[in-house]
Amino acid sequence: MSGDITTSNGQRIGLSVPLEGVPLGTHGELMAEWKSLGYTDLWSSEGNETDAFTPLVVAACSAPGLHLGTAIVPVFSRGPAVLAQSAASLAELAPGRFTLGLGSSSHLIAELWNAATFEQPYERMRSTLLFLHDAFEGKSIDGDYGAFRVGMYKLGLLPAEPPRILIAALREKMLRLSGTDADGAILTWVTASDVSRMAPFVRESGDDKQIVTRIWVAPTEDTEAAHWIGRRLTAVFLNSPALRASQEWLGRGPMLSEAWRRWDEGNFKASAAAIPVELLDELVVSGTPQDVHRRVDEYRANGVDVPVMALIPVRDVDLIDAARQYAPIS
């Protein structure tokens, strides 16, 4: 596990990449510009568009010095050895600055998209962490890790500094695992006040455990436009099984019961409309750049080490311009 790396002022702030609708091939110059505007981190994701690693390779080559991270790579979509090799390659490109963020993902992504069996996600995560620690230590591996067995394997590329490993965590059990078996947690779809409840589980194993949080940002002062896109995005995510369980654990079952009921009836529009505006404004940040950075600071104050802004497409807003306007130095 690598040691802490911070900027000169001790604060980090990230941007989620790639920007939606912006060709990946044009991101190299943009990433170098973002570095000059005060962004310290670039964090990727993985759904049905780019994979999590390729945008960070572009960043490592185009904007040396930035912290890079995956948020997240599903543990069910790659074999253990391929996962170790991909992480080691990026750790060599960005020595001491790459973080491997892992997540258990979902039945949809694991089974319907990747022909895997989505069973015992907690055990699969724990087994993956144990394997990766052994692989990054250069061990010759031939053994059972619980959820899988790996034989006759030794990682051939050992970076000078192995990547920090964080895991996506939504409830108590995985939050605790992020502290005991990893270097910390990645949070998403949480309010700033939620972080105050979740962070202590992560840091039971030490105050040095890192917390990264993706913060959804509608880059506009048009409240109506922010609510329009925010409702649609929130409805899709908060109705997924894992995030529904997380919101219930956080105590928002009664608040979201109508939205969930409408979703289960197959009425997406009514489900989105039933999300309370006060929750929407907490989960999808909007307003002036100053408004957004004040909200980001609330996350920091409640325990987030690296806030990562995910810019949401809003009508009549150019996301490239928005990344400039909402930058730490603008």
Image (spheres, rainbow, N blue to C red):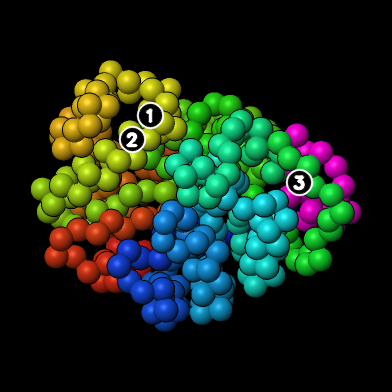
Q: Is residue 140 magenta?
A: yes
Task: State the residue at coordinates (50%, 61%).
Answer: 51
Which dot marks residue 297? none
How crowded pointer 2 is (Cα within 10 Å; few <14, some 14-19, many 20+) is rated as: many
Q: Are marks 1 and 2 in contact (CB under 8 Å)?
A: yes
Amino acid type at circle 3 is Phe
* Label 3 SS: helix
Picture layout, residue 55 above or below residue 4: below
Q: At numbered mark 1, what does the secondary structure look like: helix, strand or loop?
A: helix
Give the residue displayed 76% in from the left and 46% down from the top: 131
Magenta highlight on residue 200: no
| Inter-mark Cα distance, 1 to 2 | 5 Å
Q: Which residues are magenta?
A: 130-146
Task: Measuring from the top left, give residue 129's x and y in whole percent.
Answer: 70, 43
Give the mark, 1 or 2, whose residue is nearer the N terminus.
Answer: 2
- What label sits on residue 131 in the rendered view? 3
The count of marks equals 3
Q: On the rendered structure, is 296 left or right of 83?
A: left
Q: CA distance from mark 3 to mark 2?
A: 31 Å
Residue kind at label 2, given as amino acid type? Leu
Question: On the picture, is 14 further left or further right than 239?
Answer: right
Contact flag, marks 1 and 3 (Cβ < 8 Å): no
* x, y percent for residue 67: 55, 64
The residue at which mark 2 appears reads as: 238
Pick the quarter of the image with the C terminus.
bottom left
| The residue positioned farthest toward the top in the image shown | 254
Question: What kind of residue is marked 1?
Answer: Arg
Q: Which residue is mark 1?
A: 244
